[in-house]
Structure formats: structure tokens, C-alpha cells
Amino acid sequence: DKLNEYFPQIMDVAFTRFMEEQLDKIEEQHLDWLGVLREFYGPFKQRLETAQEQMKHAKSEVVPSEYDCPDCGAKLVYRFGRNGRFLSCSVYPECKFACPCDKDGKMVETLRSDQKCPQCGKNMVHKNSRFGSFLGCEDYPDCKGTLRLDKEGNALPPKPPAEPTGIKCHKCKEGEFVIRSSKRGPFLGCGRFPKCRTIVSIKQLEHLRELQAAGQWPPATIEQADALLGREGGKTKTAAKTKTEPKARTRTRKTPAPRSR
């Protein structure tokens, strides 16, 4: 809507068609491209300056609604977030109530769950994000506990906490490796994640413990760590595949059978 308001010419399909024809003429008929550029950029620059002065950011605009806040009784307003339009209390941040709305602006009632928040023990509610549905703590943003849902909408158990190993990270030299879980299984990752994103295969756990007990871990350089872990260029060694030269095909000419006279 804002683009249509401040840049109606650019948003017009007929203008796009006209510009394509002009570009074709520049290529085929050697039309003066500087003239075409001036003709476009002059009005565009004026509209851009007007938009910079008058256009408000979508997230800063609020639109009154017919709904009352169930927490404090004040009016709810429509706001815009990264996931689209939603309803929020007009006295925010004094009241932090917020709820989703459908495409027509109607309030979507919060669906409560029987699940308890794994962090604070309060009730959880159904929420939606760009990644799908999930359960979030009703005390958000004071509590940011969440639970994933399966395809049937059932709550999945929370991920187990990272298990410490006591093995120093060879890259940052500050953190220690912890055992984390992923879709592909457990792995070793630096406990300072996301500041340090070093990962090592879980198969190296006992080997790393032996190296650290022998005073050989962590090494001084990443190259030395790769050598101790049996890596080449940061990747685990694999059996070298020898490429055999394809055998040259020899064509044998078939001698024609003698014709009977």
C-alpha cells in the first residue's frame, strides 16, 4: 500500500511494459540511454525524497481496533511485526499483552495448553511463527520457554541440556566442548556457542580425553588439531578413491563375408 501511494508509476504494470520497450530500443535501435535514464530518474528522485520525508515505517504505525485488552482494559491497536500484523495493548510497554489476528483483522483467541513451561512452570499457549506452530510460555517476554510440536500437534519433550565434557576447545582456547543433540545425533560443540561455532565428531570424545590427559590437547594451532584428529584441510580423512584411467576401447572391424558368385 505504501509503495502504491508514494511510487504509483513504478508499481504500474503499464510502466514496466514501457520500460522494457525502451530497453529493447536501446539495444536494437541504439536509442539514447542517457535520455531514457534522465526521463526515469528525475521524477523517481523527487518521489524518493518525498517518501523519505513523509513515509512512516510500518512497524512504527498503530491503527486503533475495536477490542479491549483482557489484562488492563485499555484499547488494543494493530501493530506490524516481522510476522505481519498483530494486536497489542495501546499502553505498551506498561502492559505487554499481544495476540495474533487473522487477515481480516479479527482477534485470534489464545489457545491454552495443558503443558507446563519447562523453565518457570507456568501454563503454555499455542503460538505461530514463520517456522510453524509451537508452545510458548504465557509469561513471555519475562520467560522465553518454548516447546516444539510434532505434525499431530503434540508437544515434544524439551531438548536435554548440553552435557559438559571438560575438554578444552582448540579454536577459542576459552570454552569447553559439550555434548549436544541434533537431528543427525549427538556431537561435540563449543560451550561458547554462538561466539565460537567449533564442532567435532562425537566419535572423537574418548580420543580427545586421552590427548588432554597426556597434555597434548589443546594444541597450539588448528593445523596441529587437524593432524591429531586425523583431518585433512579441516575434514575427516577418508579412504582415497583411486581413479582408474578408462581403458581405451579398441574397435575391431568386422571383415565382410565373401560374396558367393
Image: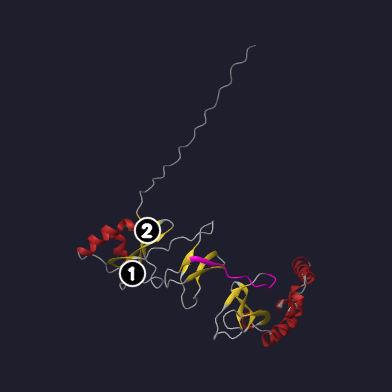
| SS for callout 1 | loop
As rendered, which of 225 and 63 lies closer to the eye?
63
Figure check: 64 above or below 193? below
Residue at 46 percent across and 72 percent down: it is: 122
Label 2, secondary structure: give it: strand
Image position of 209 with respect to 87: above or below: above
Q: Which mark is residue 186?
A: 2
Which of the 4 quarters of the picture holds residue 100?
bottom right
Quadrant where the image shows the N terminus: bottom right
The residue type indicated by label 1 comes to Lys
The numbered mark, 2 or 1, whose residue comes first in the sequence reads 1
User: Could you tell whether 245 is left or right of 60 in the image?
Assistant: left
Q: Nearer the viewer, mark 2 or mark 1?
A: 2
Is residue 237 something one can see in this rendering?
A: yes
Label at residue 234: none
Which contiguous range is marked in magenta? 103-114
Q: Residue at x 53, y 59 (%)?
A: 153
Q: Residue at x 39, y 60 (%)?
A: 181
**Residue 113, x across and y down, in percent:** 52, 66
The residue at which mark 1 appears reads as: 171
Left or right placement of residue 1 versus residue 110 in this view: right
Residue at the extreme top of the image, as rendered: 261
Q: Quadrant of residue 255?
A: top right
Q: Nearer the viewer, residue 12 or 249?
A: 12
Furthest residue to the left?
A: 214
Residue 43 among those drawn in magenta: no
Q: Amino acid at mark 2?
A: Pro
Residue at 71% across / 78% down in the picture?
2
Classed neighbour count for the residue bearing mark 1: other residues with Cα under 10 Å, few (<14), some (14–19), many (≥20): some
Distance in Å between CA atoms under marks 2 and 1: 20 Å
Query: Percent position (x, y) of residue 36?
Result: 76, 76
